[in-house]
Image (cartoon, coloured by chain):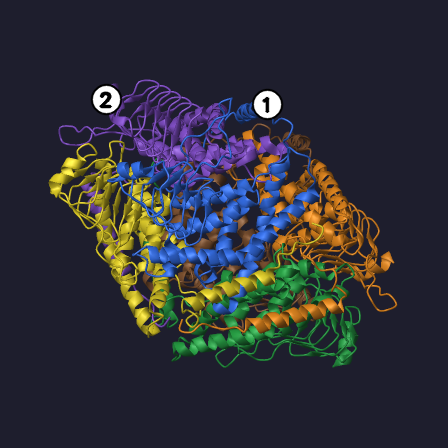
Chain colours: A orange, B brown, C green, D purple, E yellow, F blue
Amino acid sequence: MKDTANWQLDSIVTELRRARADWRLQHGRTRELGGRELPSISAVKDIIDALSGALFPMRLGPTDLRQESEDYYVGHTLDAALNALLAQIRLELVYNKRKQINNDADIEQQARGIVLRFASSLPDLRRLLDTDVMAAFHGDPAAVSVDEVLLCYPGILAVIHHRIAHHLYNEGLLLLSRIIAELAHSATGIDIHPGARIGKSFFIDHGTGVVIGETAVIGERVRVYQAVTLGAKRFESDDQGQLLKGQARHPIVENDVVIYAGATILGRITIGEGSTIGGNVWLTRSLPPGSNVTQANIQDQVGNVG
Amino acid sequence: MKDTANWQLDSIVTELRRARADWRLQHGRTRELGGRELPSISAVKDIIDALSGALFPMRLGPTDLRQESEDYYVGHTLDAALNALLAQIRLELVYNKRKQINNDADIEQQARGIVLRFASSLPDLRRLLDTDVMAAFHGDPAAVSVDEVLLCYPGILAVIHHRIAHHLYNEGLLLLSRIIAELAHSATGIDIHPGARIGKSFFIDHGTGVVIGETAVIGERVRVYQAVTLGAKRFESDDQGQLLKGQARHPIVENDVVIYAGATILGRITIGEGSTIGGNVWLTRSLPPGSNVTQANIQDQVGNVG
Amino acid sequence: MKDTANWQLDSIVTELRRARADWRLQHGRTRELGGRELPSISAVKDIIDALSGALFPMRLGPTDLRQESEDYYVGHTLDAALNALLAQIRLELVYNKRKQINNDADIEQQARGIVLRFASSLPDLRRLLDTDVMAAFHGDPAAVSVDEVLLCYPGILAVIHHRIAHHLYNEGLLLLSRIIAELAHSATGIDIHPGARIGKSFFIDHGTGVVIGETAVIGERVRVYQAVTLGAKRFESDDQGQLLKGQARHPIVENDVVIYAGATILGRITIGEGSTIGGNVWLTRSLPPGSNVTQANIQDQVGNVG
Amino acid sequence: MKDTANWQLDSIVTELRRARADWRLQHGRTRELGGRELPSISAVKDIIDALSGALFPMRLGPTDLRQESEDYYVGHTLDAALNALLAQIRLELVYNKRKQINNDADIEQQARGIVLRFASSLPDLRRLLDTDVMAAFHGDPAAVSVDEVLLCYPGILAVIHHRIAHHLYNEGLLLLSRIIAELAHSATGIDIHPGARIGKSFFIDHGTGVVIGETAVIGERVRVYQAVTLGAKRFESDDQGQLLKGQARHPIVENDVVIYAGATILGRITIGEGSTIGGNVWLTRSLPPGSNVTQANIQDQVGNVG
Amino acid sequence: MKDTANWQLDSIVTELRRARADWRLQHGRTRELGGRELPSISAVKDIIDALSGALFPMRLGPTDLRQESEDYYVGHTLDAALNALLAQIRLELVYNKRKQINNDADIEQQARGIVLRFASSLPDLRRLLDTDVMAAFHGDPAAVSVDEVLLCYPGILAVIHHRIAHHLYNEGLLLLSRIIAELAHSATGIDIHPGARIGKSFFIDHGTGVVIGETAVIGERVRVYQAVTLGAKRFESDDQGQLLKGQARHPIVENDVVIYAGATILGRITIGEGSTIGGNVWLTRSLPPGSNVTQANIQDQVGNVG
Amino acid sequence: MKDTANWQLDSIVTELRRARADWRLQHGRTRELGGRELPSISAVKDIIDALSGALFPMRLGPTDLRQESEDYYVGHTLDAALNALLAQIRLELVYNKRKQINNDADIEQQARGIVLRFASSLPDLRRLLDTDVMAAFHGDPAAVSVDEVLLCYPGILAVIHHRIAHHLYNEGLLLLSRIIAELAHSATGIDIHPGARIGKSFFIDHGTGVVIGETAVIGERVRVYQAVTLGAKRFESDDQGQLLKGQARHPIVENDVVIYAGATILGRITIGEGSTIGGNVWLTRSLPPGSNVTQANIQDQVGNVG
């Protein structure tokens, strides 16, 4: 209280400016800067929450919703969410194109086109998510109602985020789709790259520690437990030793596969339809349909596969 | 700015309504709907935060609390939390009974009875949690004070949530208890089903990835590390291939057991008193008291158990 | 609505007071209490968010930031964050010294000294974090820009928290540093004790389930994947069976080591420079530089190391 | 910081309890108390804000509203506002009837009836308010658009509040209607008792200091300026010297009257159609149609009226 | 969106700094500045709201308050409000003494003494306010309950503020007391200087435009209507033409006086007990007890007084 | 709780839509509508609060501001406020030009030009406001410091708003300037039209009920008390009986005039330099310099003026 503290702000601010300047110089960014053109994590979070409510009004919407006003709620909430999404998409499009020649009119048109396509995909998205909800309900003996599934299952929350993120990823909006994926990752411990292609009736139970890579392909009615990894084996490098980006490097999991907790499946291999992968199994080779791999039998089994 | 965007809201709202209608038709829910009668996740979160403050006022209460006003804070906070809890319980009771004949008076009386029993259990709950706090303090060489334990240990946060959730689970409030469990799961990565029965002086260190199933039974002075699973082995199905719900299917862990990180214990087996389970061990058979299982000795050890 | 509920508040408040009194009696705390002198988790969270913005204004600062106002934003945000940090540090210093003789003037001077040193370390902290960002960008084939890394990678968020927490840990502020570490743990599933010493260009990918212990030492350019544990083997106890606190008990990881997902490395062992540890490997002995351990070769490999 | 302050809370709380008990004893309220059953000012404020937006969506609704979503906004906002209003009405009905025998079912039915009638009156209310807006636009040479009138004129804000409050006053909800009137009074300085009956195309300019009493009756196309009082002359008392409540005691102002700033009109007198009352005029007798009273001519004029 | 706006911030910030520097130079404040030591208007607002709730818990407290928890609410709310008040008082004491020699210990002791005296005065304050509430109820024929009076009468809100502000004014806290008075002024249009001394059972009806000066003295059972001024006549100046501050310059109004709307009473005159002052009367001379002044009779009446 | 309420929303929404459609039809607005393009009151309020803090950082800025960080606060706050102002100005420019041909580029350029000019005027604005603060301090014997004046005087708050609003009014932004004026009117009861031209060292004491019209012109060192009106006499109408807008119709008040409470001055008259207008005086003719008008002498005085 007596005398006032003094943090030497001027010198710290100057030093921080120098650190930024050095970094920009090193990375050839000295000319490009005007304003920040990155999406906002908290804005994206609000959008996803609103979309979730609009998709499942009676279960994820406001607690006092009544049937009479369901459509009004859905229409009004969608409208606000889509406008907010438009603003975030604009930011990413400006960001994405800053280094190329570009004009605003184009970005505005592009952004609106994306929102329009996204909006019109929502009814199908809802029907797809319904299959996931039913998969969870039927896949967990502890589940007592589909309402519990929607309110309480982190796997459902992760899948809602993923299916929205995947749509935007396909539109070329990597940042937005990654932000959405990380929101789910932070809330659930389930880390699905928005690039992963996942069929209907997908169920992740418990989920903490699940990692699904960018180029993974998952069929229909697949069930996955906590700490399962669908990852890359080794990364390929170019001549300069830099990692090659964008290669298909994660597993293909066919329909009706079950993968128990802690299993690690690496590389562009295929797990054949209807297979069961036991807990903690470590797998880097493809499996034919109907395989049943456990820690006990893994050496032989894997041998057979080759 | 020029012309205003148009999202074809009417058609999307209509299509979403159809998707909901189809779902309701498929699941025989066309008649039941009036209003949303599901508890609210954010309301439950506020209740748990308030209860935590009332249970540990000087450590989880407001930062400017002084001894003089401790009881006023506790009384006022409890009052608000119990009233809010009453409202959430009403919602779940209405939900739970919608399909059966039921009358409001009954629900109101039931709800108040539950709150009253819960309220009167709080002093014992506090004493029980004190044993958990001491277990954490004594169980982790990095812990320097019990205050640090309460402020910083995710395991303590998970146990506070679990002991509250378990009380409500025993009152038949599955949704509320599951919401509470998932709040802890999301914040800590520790996934304890509210049905699990856990004795005093329980300590989970680090905790990310821990999964404890609905019918697990854990004794006193048990210590558990990150990524430990107390799970089910296989789920039994009925004649139609539907999973059977409500079977005892998770392990019994007796007093004074320690389970190191990554161990997976599956099925209705018993880990005898005073046993130690090493890291990453995979266990599906019972162990006698005093067992000491590690990855190295596991084949023999398990052989002996049989 | 008819009659008002009654929770027997007086008796519960009395019983809770007794539970607290018993606990204080048992732990010899009956005399010390005046007011709560513990840092506040939510205050600390706000401070870290503000510091993150001040360190990376164009990527973690406000969405409408423009270059013209960058320094004003940095200066104003830092000022508020440092003042808030000063208040939290005062609380911990009062807490830390309550049991010894102490006088306020000293605490005020100490607190200001800590803030001043912390503030002046920020430019170096930023340069250090720049190396971590580049390590993430080069270490993940899915990363398309450094901006994506800062916005979306939980590993970066964890490292920002850790480097701040570690500074405060070195100043003797255990509670504050642990709170910061747990904020990152809750958001990312990455659990790094603030005591761990970590060199530049550190990258954690995916991250859920990573645990790094208090006395771990990590070199430069180390890469770590999800569910990796750098833990203690067994805890040593004193004559009374109490765990010994403060012993060096976690691994030393030298420069340019890569540790793949799920690997568990326990005890005060050394992983030699440039080694690669395969997924799910369980390791309790030191490795010479350039080692390459996988599940397949581990028995031999480890044998060789001895 | 040194020692903690102590406010002798216990003794103050006890003394305050005694003061409340004495008051309750004095006013015969010792038995009635259970819970607080009074409407909430801030809840009512939110309801009025929402209703204003629903009535004038493009001008008082959200800033990003577009024509496409107007009806969704109106429906959703109305729904929330009407539900919230229902809750406040319940509180007042319980309050109003506490002293008589009463049962809940009745109150619930009554409350819903009131909301239903209020809801169905909204379209007419909007059309009525449109006449007020046009009156303001035509009545003030400084007004440049009807949009400015709705956004900026305190008189319009006061009239929106009044017309809503008056509807509820007619339903017997005195507390709610008075709270609404005071919200307008506090925001604008215009104090209209909700009992006042006011015809269409009413305009108050500037408005600060305007007071319009409970039994005032105002015709169509009346214009009023700041600091005008339509008040009571003297209050009649009963035999015990208590003021008589509910008597018609305020002026009747007929169609097309203009009352300039500061005029004071007291008692149950009638200002005839088309009259003009000059600034600061003090008037306690009736005036025939077409009168024109100013400070200058008031003695004669009033004489003529007799 | 295309290019980023640029506001020439550096030059404006520099110019504003110069404007501040010039002002400080002109007013001899160049040396004193360290930090801002002025109370905060919004902090004071929160304190008054909390105190109002603690004084009238069942009517101005939280809407869900029940009798069982009344004392807990009062104790907890008071505690928070008194701590917050202590902080504001410290700020003003530091401010007040900056120009003289002063030491912190003293200020802390002084601040706590003021809070302690204020806290212990609250029960009497409540009893005093009860007389004001009854005066309003009996003084307005439109009032139907004391609850309506507390919820809806701006005069009561102004008197609650005034009686708190006056206590602090007497402790020498001019800034705090003036901030409180202006909060009431802004909300009600009633402007009472905190220095005014006002007896019990005071009632202001409608209130907009009421002004009561610093040295006014008002007896018991006084009733005042809107736009009444109890002001100063002319200000006396010193030799340099500066206004003399602190002179008794406002009216003394004795017991049982009624002052109707718009009356202006100026100078250190005395309105004798039981007098009635008519609407719009302009008065600058004292009146004997029992006077009855109206616009009509004022010339004679005033003549009589002389 | 039993059955859910039903408000017939569909029919009310339909009827409200019809009411809006009828209104739009009547006022020829059927074609123009796209989105709402009106400034937002709450956004404007935040802007003014921020500008006030930037203008007087140590008195209206954040409570913990210190001299070291003053410029950072000013720069950062200004930046945010100017960006927010830019957005509001865009909205009004779009609104203003909707009926004429217009293109976006122009509006953007115009908006930025206005903000730039406004920003560069702030240092002069601050110096001008300093003269107002000093005028208040010297003009009120109750004022004890300039800090009290800035924190507590509604007249200062009104003048800060007015000087900002007047700048925007001169740029043709009527809606924004009127919104700002009404924010002050609502908070203080002082109603100054943004068009009024006011010289330096202007002081309004108490202020409730003051009305200053659009074309009023006020000189330097003028002092005004509560309830003073500087208004129009009668409005001139055109041939259709519509009021003529934009005529000079309010008083000119020359330097060093004092106008006491309740005085009403109407029409385009001139109050000569150094005049004093007594309380409640009613004035509709010009006065020569040095006049001294009171209620007592008004007939003669006014007679002399003619």
Query: To which chain does the residue with label 1 belong?
Result: F
Mark 1 and mark 2 on one chain: no
Q: Residue at x 71, y 42 (%)?
A: A201
Of residues C158 and E84, which is closer to you in this image? E84
Q: Which numbered disc covers residue D208?
A: none
Q: Could you tell whether A180 is left or right of F78 in the image?
A: right
Amino acid on which the number 1 mark rests in the picture: Leu
Of residues E239 and C208, which is closer to you in this image? E239
Residue located beneath label 2 in the image: D303
Q: Could you tell whether F181 is left or right of A240 in the image?
A: left
In this rendering, does residue C280 appear at all? no
Q: Position of residue C237 (x, y in %)?
A: 53, 78
Q: How many marks?
A: 2
Q: Quadrant of residue D197?
A: top left
Q: Position of residue F136 (x, y in %)?
A: 37, 55
Q: Position of residue C2 (x, y in %)?
A: 35, 35
**Which quadrant of the rendered structure holds the C terminus of chain E?**
top left
Q: Could you tell whether E164 is left or right of C206 in the image?
A: left
Residue located beneath label 1 in the image: F25
Q: Quadrant of residue A77?
A: top right
Front tag of 1 and 2: 2
Q: Of helix, strand and loop, which one carries label 2?
A: helix
Cβ atoms under marks 1 and 2 closer than 8 Å: no
Amino acid on which the number 2 mark rests in the picture: Gly
Q: Quadrant of residue C126?
A: bottom right
Is F278 situated above or below E175?
Answer: above
Q: Could you tell whether C306 is left or right of F81 in the image?
A: right
Of residues D155 and A89, which is closer to you in this image? D155
Query: To which chain does the residue with label 2 belong?
Result: D
Q: Position of residue D40 (x, y in %)?
A: 38, 40
